Amino acid sequence: SVYHRIVTAITNINCSHNGHEYVDLGLPSGTMWAKCNVGAATPEDRGDVYAYGEIYPNTNYSTSTYTGEQGDFLPAEADVASVFWGGGWHIPTIAEMDELRFYCIWEWNGQGYIVTGPNGCSIFIPVNNGWFYIRSSSVNYVLRGASDELEVLVSPSAYATYAIRPVFRPENNN
């Protein structure tokens, strides 16, 4: 109901973990999604972009400058969210991205997606040049979307740079 959405949205204002704001979308796993991408001042800002396993922003798409991890799954020291946000924040797994895709309502508004969870609370995912890409913690996988498309797909290379939208699970951070 509208009343439920308003009450839930009010209770999610200014929730923060380890100094970073998040939204409880009411997902079955209990995963909390950050309000903003890493390096973004607002939800509408794309923020910084990172190659796989690199912890500093990189806009140079080159194999010669790539210094990231080569494994299938990022260790904490190669996860920019874990390194700079701490407190259990991490780059989302494919399973966490799939949960966001399948349990939430995705509404296109021209500048990006309003992603509303089962409890009525929302996050915003901005687009850049009509698309958004969010890096996964699994090598070469990204969540990609546009006005008519939403999928987890294989990226062409580990050194391609994408935005990071951190997540954490409260039960892992006691």
Image: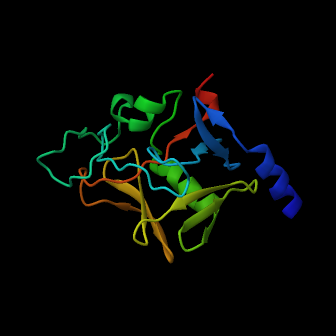
Q: Residue at x 59, y 61 (%)?
A: 102
Q: Residue at x 30, y 53 (%)?
A: 161
Side of 12 relative to 54 (left or right): right
Q: Nearer the viewer, residue 119 or 107?
A: 107
Q: Farthest residue to the top: give it.
A: 174
Q: Residue at x 47, y 45 (%)?
A: 92
Residue 73 lies in quadrant: top left
- Answer yes or no: is residue 53 visible: yes
Residue 86 image offset from top left, x and y in percent = 49, 28
Q: Farthest residue to the left: give it.
A: 64
Q: Is residue 90 above or below residue 95?
A: above
Residue 81 image offset from top left, x and y in percent = 44, 37
Residue 72 image offset from top left, x and y in percent = 31, 43
Residue 36 image offset from top left, x and y in percent = 54, 48
Q: Farthest residue to the front: give it.
A: 41
Total labels: the figure holds 0
Image quadrant for the C terminus?
top right
Q: Is residue 67 above or below residue 4?
A: above
Side of 149 relative to 102 (left or right): left
Q: Nearer the viewer, residue 96 or 162?
A: 162
Q: Is residue 90 above or below residue 136?
A: above
- Answer yes or no: is residue 1 visible: no
Q: Residue at x 25, y 61 (%)?
A: 156
- The colour mode here is rainbow
Image quadrant for the N terminus?
bottom right
